[in-house]
Amino acid sequence: MADKFTDPLLTPKEVARHLRIPESTMYYWLAEEANGAPLVHRVAPEKRGWPSVPFVAVVEAYVLRALRDLGLTKNKIRKAAADVRRALDTPYALATKKITTDGVDIFIHYANDDLARAGDGQRPFREVIDDYLHYIDWDARDGFAASLRLRQYSDVAPVIIDPRFGWGAPVIASTKVPVDAIVDLWLAGESLEDVAYEYGLTRDQVEDICRVTRAA
């Protein structure tokens, strides 16, 4: 099993694709610092172009994406991350369950009046943030993130990133089959029914996975 803090699982480009954020934003977060540590952590790749983003950093980027989607500026995001790290006393504060309480309060502090009601103008900022954090599964042993569900995939076939499976590649939550394996078989000319049979899925699940992946 990969170490969630030190083992590089994905490239910055892959993280940007899976989380649906601009690559330029991902590289900015990797280069910027907050409270003496990278805004999004990275480790040295074994070779140029190889993975450099550990699982904990994927979760950090996901949380920052939530703040970005809600309209916080780069400066406010950096300051909020620094305050969360100081308050929770860990450089990995963006990936610990404690963020669901104290961390959200700090985020709200940095949201101006225009963000008091976020997104569609109906739900309060806290409710929207809580919805984002709901997609993170927390490890009861250490309180840090254990897996991350990718929001773009529906309940028909939930997809997760989990350092215990697939070495960071997105997998089906129920079967742990890599998403790429499903899509590659379909792109090779196999029918949805045959792909479903091969991996023990339903046709609807395979269709949903292929539709979302191809739309990315």
Image (cartoon, grey):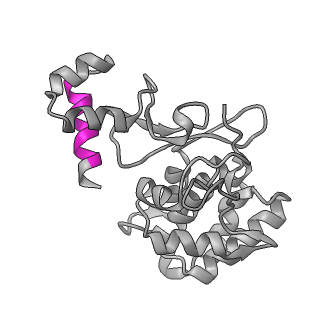
Q: Is residue 169 left or right of residue 190?
A: right
Position of the C terminus by quadrant = bottom left
Q: 94 or 50: which is nearer to us?
A: 50
Please indicate, yes or no, whether residue 143 appears anywhere in the rendered image: yes
Residue most extreme to the front:
47
Q: Is residue 140 left or right of residue 212?
A: right
**Where is residue 117 shown, x and y percent of the image?**
46, 70
Q: Main secondary structure of the magenta part?
A: helix
Position of the N terminus by quadrant = top right
Image quarter of residue 164: top right
Q: Is residue 212 magenta?
A: yes
Q: Is residue 73 above or below residue 126?
A: below
Q: 61 or 79: which is nearer to us?
A: 61
Image quarter of residue 168: top right
What residue is at 50 percent from the left and 73 percent from the top?
25
What residue is at 67 percent from the left and 37 percent from the top?
2
**Where is residue 151 shown, x and y percent of the image?**
41, 48
Q: Is residue 147 above or below residue 6?
A: above
Magenta-highlighted residues: 203-213
Q: Is residue 159 left or right of residue 189?
A: right
What residue is at 75 percent from the left and 71 percent from the top?
82
Please indicate, yes or no, whether residue 70 appears anywhere in the rendered image: no
**Where is residue 77 shown, x and y percent of the image?**
62, 74
Q: 205 or 186: which is nearer to us?
A: 186
**Where is residue 15 shown, x and y percent of the image?**
50, 56
Image quarter of residue 157: top left
How many tags in the picture?
A: 0
Q: Is residue 168 left or right of residue 107?
A: left
Q: Is residue 52 magenta?
A: no
Q: Is residue 54 above or below residue 41?
A: above
